[in-house]
């Protein structure tokens, strides 16, 4: 879901000293008494994870944050944090921040799926429009003021992948645009954001906008996603063709449906909604 959330990323070393000093200094600059969520951005391989977990527990008990989460951690790193917190009776992380959209699905729907199921972990999503690709910004070519044209070195691997496969991706985007306009009376961007927030494992979504009108348009996805039916989800899956490989049921060696499609009631493998 889209909602306002006061959060803070701690991107430096995640030692007790840096977590406490960094959070206090940031709160002072922000003129806040606390933040809702403080994230450990990127895993710190040079600080014992137990020290990080103890420090995050301390800042929450001191009222400097309500919750803590991880950002761009692997599933095994997050799992180890949960084990440490359970063993030491510490407050565990409640959310992971990750990239997720129609074109980037493997991490949320694959690597992290067991954490959602086992710990009811939430997910804060960034780049639901994949740098504007899923808003159809580049369907008519790459604008001269785009990040890719200005500095392709920082455009990111996904943007470069789109440029290399533009014809194939654009065919999919045009079909999705047709669904958005004819079946939902919305923009391609609104459909893409709606598709993300419809996933029950996604608890919040970060939007980036260069204009107020752009933000106002994207926020309307909160209403659009309620109109998405199982049939529309299935049609979108057939267009995308990129459902992450599911778990294997070794009783009959059959691939199980993805966690997302199970939650949404879409039996993609059989080509229709679940009963």
Image (cartoon, helix red, strand yellow):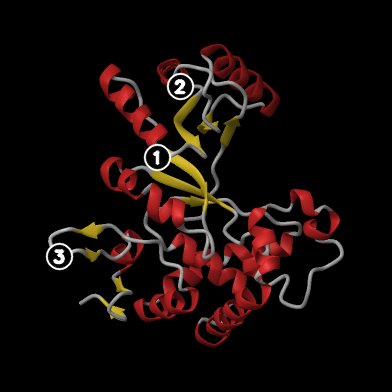
Query: How far apart in space, not on screen, are marks 2 and 1 (Cα)?
Result: 19 Å
Q: Looking at the picture, how far across and down is residue 164, in whole percent?
A: 68, 67
The residue that mark 1 highlights is 75
Q: Nearer the viewer, mark 2 or mark 3?
A: 3
Q: Check disc 3 and report the residue beneath it.
A: 252
Element at label 3: loop
Seen in the picture, residue 208 relative to 253 is either above or below; the reply is: above
Give left or right: position of 145 versus 83.
Answer: right
| Residue 55 picture location, percent across and down | 46, 17
The mark closer to the camera, 2 or 1, is 1
Q: Is residue 170 above or below residue 248?
A: below
| Spatial separation of the CA atoms under disc 2 and disc 3 | 44 Å
**Residue drawn 28% across the image and 78% down it:** 273
- Name the residue nearer the viewer: 71 or 156: 156
Return the mark for residue 105: none
Which residue lies under the disc numbered 2? 56
Pick whichever of labels 1 and 3 is earlier in the sequence.
1
Q: Give the Cα distance between marks 1 and 3.
A: 27 Å
| Image side of residue 97 versus residue 77, left or right | right
Q: Earlier in the sequence, mark 2 or mark 1?
A: 2
At a point 45% along the width and 21% down the height, the residue shown is 56
In depth, the one of 213 and 177 nearer the eye is 177
Tell me which corner region of the image, top left, top right, bottom left or bottom right, holds residue 75: top left
């Amino acid at each position: 879901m889209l909602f306002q959330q006061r959060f803070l990323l701690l991107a430096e070393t995640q030692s007790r000293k840096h977590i406490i000093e960094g959070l206090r200094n940031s709160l002072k600059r922000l003129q806040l008494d606390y933040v809702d969520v403080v994230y450990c951005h990127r895993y710190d391989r040079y600080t014992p994870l137990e020290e990080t977990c103890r420090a995050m527990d301390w800042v929450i008990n001191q009222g400097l944050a309500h919750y803590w989460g991880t950002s761009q951690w692997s599933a095994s790193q997050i799992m180890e944090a949960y084990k440490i917190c359970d063993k030491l009776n510490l407050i565990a992380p409640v959310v992971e921040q990750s990239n997720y959209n129609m074109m980037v699905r493997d991490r949320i729907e694959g690597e992290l799926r067991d954490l959602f199921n086992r710990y009811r972990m939430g997910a804060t999503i960034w780049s639901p429009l994949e740098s504007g690709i899923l808003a159809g910004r580049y369907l008519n070519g790459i604008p001269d003021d785009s990040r890719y044209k200005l500095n392709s070195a920082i455009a990111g691997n996904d943007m470069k992948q789109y440029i290399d496969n533009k014809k194939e991706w654009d065919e999919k985007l045009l079909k999705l645009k047709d669904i958005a306009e004819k079946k939902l009376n919305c923009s391609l961007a609104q459909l893409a954001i709606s598709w993300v927030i419809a996933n029950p494992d996604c608890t919040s979504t970060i939007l980036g906008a260069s204009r107020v009108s752009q933000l106002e348009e994207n926020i309307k996805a909160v209403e659009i996603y309620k109109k998405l039916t199982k049939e529309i989800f299935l049609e979108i899956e057939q267009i995308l063709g990129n459902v992450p490989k599911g778990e294997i049921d070794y009783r009959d060696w059959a691939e199980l449906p993805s966690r997302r499609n199970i939650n949404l009631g879409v039996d993609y493998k059989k080509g229709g909604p679940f009963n």
